[in-house]
Amino acid sequence: MKTENITPQNGHSYPSGYELAYPPNEHIRSRVVFDGGNRFLKWVDASGVVQCIPSCIKECSEYQWKRLKPDPQTFLVEVDSKRYAIGKLAQDLGGDPTFQKDKCELAEILALVAIEPIEGSDFVHISQFAIALPNSLNDADLEAVKRLENHPDYRVFKRNGIEICYTIRSVEPLDETYPAFLYAKSQDFFSFPDHKNAIWDIGGGTSIARIYLPNGTLVEDGEVILPGTKALAQQVAVELQHSTGMDYTPKLEHIMDAIQRSDFLYSTDHIDFSAIYQKVCEQWVESARSEIRSKWAEHLPELGEVLITGGSAHLAAPICEASGERFKIAPNPQLFNIVAMANMEA
């Protein structure tokens, strides 16, 4: 083994005199999975437990940073002389929801919540860091997430006040629907595994439906891109402001939270927007139904089933009811994709 002094690429120094045999096997994580969604960040921690926190980031001043209090749904990250709250606290402090930004550009910071050594250690080498992307062939997105690769140089950051030194050998970009297809097939979710089957991932920013051949090959002309709950929230916000005479624009993340809770109540005043949502949702469902019928016209006779995943999978319930068994919502659809990623072979 080669013994090296740690000199992180970002310029931060690891404690002087600290040396290690590189790479020490007991500190290697062969594969880490991360799904940096527009609404929620999901990953599997060093103990093998799925984590899920709101996808929101807030850059904090030094003064504000000193006043932050711990929150189980929040991670406090210090990197490159900047301080970030990521998760619920960022949301409560009026931070930037990921759906209003470019999640691939933010991955370099957001993904730090998933970089975790084993208990009792402060450094880790990750052989493969798997990240879900809307389109793994998009050059700009690939370039953004590949910035996480830093082997053999070490980087240092603080996560909840603990200094962590890490390397990542390679980033594996994965189309958001592909792991779900492989996992669904391996778990016998498809009644017709020898036919074409589809995954429809309905998230906060986008809704992506893709058809796959039995061996996992993507059917190129079978991709359907639709708006996610962000578009629904935008329509609800406009009508809610108009109907109530609000002198401010309702926040999209609060509307989306209310939709996910299924109570359709906005703010502490409990403004009920269920009637507005019902109308907007019916329009969304009909638009989705029409787009899928049009795009999949030649594939439907040969299509086995469509498994619906993602935090907003419930939006497609009317389509499932109308289609019999052809369209069905995955069990625990919010976490289905990250579980699928974790079950892929490295």
Image: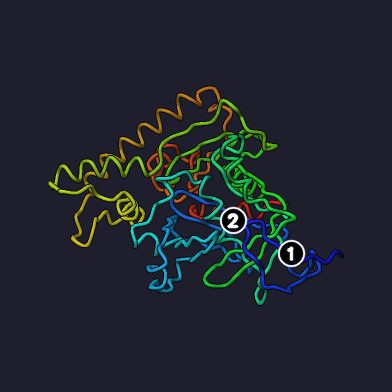
- Tag 1: residue type? Ile
Q: Residue at x 83, y 67 (%)?
A: 3
Considering only vertical position in the picture, is 346 above or below 159?
above
Q: Residue at x 50, y 40 (%)?
A: 200
Tell me how the rendering is colored: rainbow
Residue wearing tag 2: 339
Taking 43 as reference, is 54 left or right?
left
Residue wearing tag 1: 28
Earlier along the polypeptide chain: callout 2 or callout 1? 1
Q: Residues within 10 Å of mark 1 (few under 14, many from 20)?
A: some
Q: Quadrant of the N terminus?
A: bottom right
Considering only vertical position in the picture, is 23 above or below 56?
below
Residue 304 at x, y percent in the picture: 57, 35
Query: Circle 2 sits in a helix, a strand or a loop, which is it?
Result: helix
Question: Is mark 2 in CB contact (under 8 Å) with mark 1?
Answer: no
All told, the count of numbered labels is: 2
Residue 80 at x, y percent in the picture: 55, 59
Taking 41 as reference, is 227 left or right?
left
As drawn, the residue found furthest toward the top would be: 298
Quarter location, residue 174: top right
Q: CA distance from mark 2 to mark 1?
A: 21 Å
Query: Circle 1 sits in a helix, a strand or a loop, which is it?
Result: strand
- Tag 2: residue type? Val
Foreground of the two, 192 or 219: 219
Residue 128 at x, y percent in the picture: 70, 53
Q: Residue at x 61, y 62 (%)?
A: 115
Which mark is in front, 2 or 1?
1
Q: Residue at x 34, y 36 (%)?
A: 284
Residue 324 at x, y percent in the picture: 46, 39
Residue 109 tag number: none
